[in-house]
Image: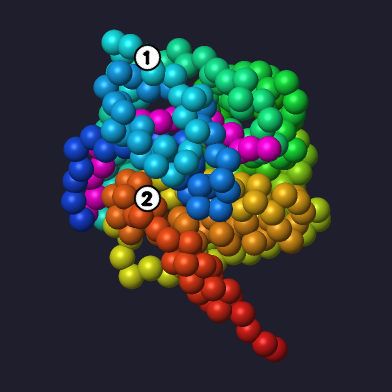
Amino acid sequence: MSLIILGSVAFDALETPFGKTDKIVGGAASYAAIAASYVYDAVKIVGVVGEDFGEDNLSKFTRKNIDISGIQVKAGEKSFFWSGKYHNDMNTRDTLVTELNVLGDFDPVIPESYQDATYILLGNLSPQVQLTALQRLKQRPKLVVMDTMNFWMDVALDRLKEVLKQVDVLTINDEEARQLSGEYSLVKAAEAILNMGPKYLIIKKGEHGALLFGEGKIFVAPALPLAEVFDPTGAGDTFAGGFIGYLANKGTVNFENMKSAVIYGSALASFCVEKFGTERIEELTVQQIKERTEIFSTLTSFVI
Ligand code: AMP
């Protein structure tokens, strides 16, 4: 039994109103795997890096007991590089550079030792790569969670819809849900998207929390009101990693466990934005996460 996290493992260069970084470790799979490792002990990454990534950076994963035998290291090639600059509101950003490098022809390899996977997160990558990874598993995992973004809706909508038919949970943000469904109301958007295949849908609303739809029910999760957001990069990936890690730990997939998983993911995401890159989520303790999930529960508890 294990949890596979498929996604980019990258170098990022970030600029926010609070400062700037040189190349630091980023990528959807990096955030998600580190997040999941706090709650589940058999996390395995599928990804690709170039020779420039180095042992030292890979040790960020192995230090957390994350299996990296599914990360291909391409000799003589460069890792995926992304650079972004946030506006003053911290909700919007401009992509300054995207160098696909090794991600350009990424052909995901699933090691034999990963074939016991019961959970998989198809992190934000081309729908074709997501589909290939899923097809290379001899047994369909018990839970397939997919993350995607508007870019893939623009350039590969048909393939994206093909993947959607095979997933249990889709996580996207509010604007993406509107684009995918053609509906402005998020309730109508959810209904339309659930008709495309997934049994559950999570709509992320950034600083306004997240909505979970499924089994004819809706759950509303808050976001922690933070005095300062330092760097929002990877918050969505951290959320997804925490969410699926929590469910893998529980072992039972139902709406009640999903509600708790949404809160667990939201708590981890609230740490992620406190420092640049993966820095904050690398240094957490289980106790700190527990305390933060308790804050979430007091935030929304009331009596009428
Ligand atoms: P988020 O802030 O959740 O959108 O995730 C940001 C992370 O996604 C960064 O660490 C980037 O390295 C990674 N990323 C950006 N663009 C892409 C892309 N086209 N494909 C895969 N990963 C990407």
On the image, which quarter does residue 114 sit in? top right
Main secondary structure type of the part rendered in magenta: strand
Quarter of the figure that contains the C terminus: bottom right
Instruction: Name the mark on residue 282.
Output: 2
The reply to whether residue 178 is visible in this rendering is no
Left or right: 89, with 300 as reference point: left
Q: Position of residue 167 (x, y in %)?
A: 70, 35
Q: Answer above or below: position of 222 versus 153.
A: below
Q: Position of residue 82 (x, y in %)?
A: 32, 31
Q: Residue at x 76, y 51 (%)?
A: 252
For label 1, being within 8 Å of ligand 1 is answered: no
Could you say which is closer to the camera, residue 43 or residue 220?
A: 43
Q: Tell me, yes or no, whether the highlighted magenta stretch contains residue 40.
A: no
Tell me which numbered mark, 2 or 1, is placed earlier along the sequence.
1
**Where does the magenta region start and end?**
1-17
Could you say which is closer to the camera, residue 165 or residue 264?
A: 264
Instruction: Name the mark on residue 251.
Output: none
Q: Answer above or below: position of 167 versus 16.
A: above
Circle 1 residues within 10 Å: few <14, some 14–19, many ≥20: some
Quarter of the figure that contains the N terminus: top right
On the image, which quarter does residue 128 sit in? top right
Q: CA distance from mark 2 to mark 1?
A: 25 Å
Left or right: 269, with 156 as reference point: left
Three-letter amino acid code at the position of disc 2: Glu
Q: Position of residue 192 (x, y in %)?
A: 73, 42
Q: Which residue is mark 1?
A: 74
Q: Residue at x 54, y 34 (%)?
A: 44
